[in-house]
Amino acid sequence: MPIAASNSMSIRFLNKQPAVQQLTDEELVSKFAATQQQTYFEELYRRYIHLAYGVCLKLMKNEDDSRDVVSDVFKILFTKLPTADVKSFKAYLYTVSRNECIAKLRQRKSDSEKLAKYNHLENSPDDFMENDGFAALFNTNPSMEQEVERAVVQLGDEQQTCIRLFFYDDKSYREIATETGFTEKQVKSYLQNGKRNLRILLEKELRKHTA
Amino acid sequence: MDGNLQQRIFRPTACISHEELRQYLGGRMSRDGVRRVEDHLLDCPLCSDAVEGCEEAGNHLTDDLEDFEAFSKKLPSQPGAKVRQLQPWTGYLRQAIAVAAVLAVGLFAYLNFGESPDGPALYAKYYTAYQTDVPVSMRHANSPDVNPNFAQAISAYSDRNYTQAAMLFDRALMQQPENEATLFYAGLSYLETSKLDKASECLGSVAKGTGVYAKKANWYLVMCELKAGKKAEATARLDKIIEASEIMVNEAKSLREEL
């Protein structure tokens, strides 16, 4: 056993591990923390580098700065992941990326205008929707269909229009923008807010069903 | 109106891959692909901000991002990691000796005992705790209109307090004996606390259904059987998982080989 433990090649040879591509983010984090093998971290890097870079680009507004920050972000992750209590990797990555951008902007006086816009983001809660569990709760409440329709009707006009065109008629942001005269950004915003409101309304209904 | 509208609105979607981002920004994506991406952007601030960042930079593509091989050279040494710089020939020699030694031990064990690793050992190797996916807003018991047992149980499960979670899920099941989410998490909590009969009962009920947790429950039933040392049952179930090709297939194949 000590011989095997001292030689990762022989371990891999004898114990065929599940492919890293098949593991969830949280499994990769957990296995990286347990073994400190770079393979697990590499898979997380491959899955998310482009997204972390895009987030940095949104805040830094500069490609070179974004490259530097995203590199720092993954160095931080590499060091911290083994001991961090990570419940959702992507939420953790999102927070680290935003905070690193803000820290970088803070170092430069010339970026104070940009920074003022982003100060509120630091340590603010992430708004990731966790649909898995919500869908599961629906599963045991098939009669919710009518409640969904009732909830949609309670939304404001813009949100309701966008929700109907997107989820009922399968239209894209661009098609909805063309049809309604809203900009694509407005369409996305109405959909995000509409879906969030819909969820709040339906959670209340679900609680009544499960109480 | 679609009969499954509520599930379509709240269906879980995966993050956008690098290739999908390229296609979406480049306007080269199929209509279905665009709908999938845009559906996901509503739920995921990471992907939403990433797309907006690239769009605001003039549909900037991310093709020239550093690959991991180049990036890994900048990494600090891992705290607690054993970093060994092997010399080419002595390194290979040591590896060869180690591999030969392990093979010899393995061959000796095989000839003398002829058994695969035991169930609990395989359980320890393959088991990964399931991360809760129940919305955060439904984990707070203080709210007067939440089923307190379910909310407290999910909260305890999230905190990895599985003994308390199992007890609370049990109470929730008295009120809603067929609730899939409650049965699934109760099964996982019993599995963690080694109450394997109860775990098997709860997960078995979920696996028989067609809900979103049914396939996941099947995998955790395998874990349950391994932990109980029931290798034959685990093997039979793995065969079904592999044949159905639905979930955890690669892990199932790998585990099947070891069994």
Image (spheres, coloured by chain):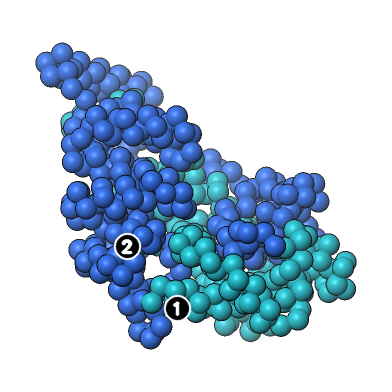
Q: Position of residue B92 (x, y in %)?
A: 34, 22
Is A194 in front, or is A33?
A194
Judging from the image, mark 1 belongs to the subunit labelled: A
Q: In the image, what residue occupies the spot 32% across and 62% down?
A: B177
To which chain does the residue with label 2 belong? B
CA gap between label 2 and label 1 equals: 17 Å
B44, above or below B20, in the image: below
Q: Please, what is the three-letter code of the amino acid marked with disc 2?
A: Pro
Q: Which shade is chain B?
A: blue
- The percent position of residue B241, horizontal first and vertical second, equals 41, 35
Question: Which residue is label 1 attached to?
Answer: A208
Instruction: Find the residue positioned furthest to the left.
Output: B112
In the rendered image, residue B174, in percent from the top left (x then y), is placed at 27, 67
Residue nearer the viewer, B213 or A188: B213
Which is more toward the observer, B76 or A119? A119
Q: Residue at x 20, y 35 (%)?
A: B230
Q: Residues within 10 Å of mark 1 (few under 14, many from 20)?
A: few
Query: Quick check: B212 left or right of B196?
Result: right
Of the 4 image quadrants, the one containing the C terminus of chain A is bottom left
Q: Read off the residue under disc 2.
A: B177
The answer to whether one can see residue B91 in this image is no
Q: Position of residue A38 (x, y in %)?
A: 42, 43
Q: What is the display colour for chain A?
A: cyan
Up-down: is A137 above or below B82?
below
> What residue do we see at 65% from left, 72% from top?
A149
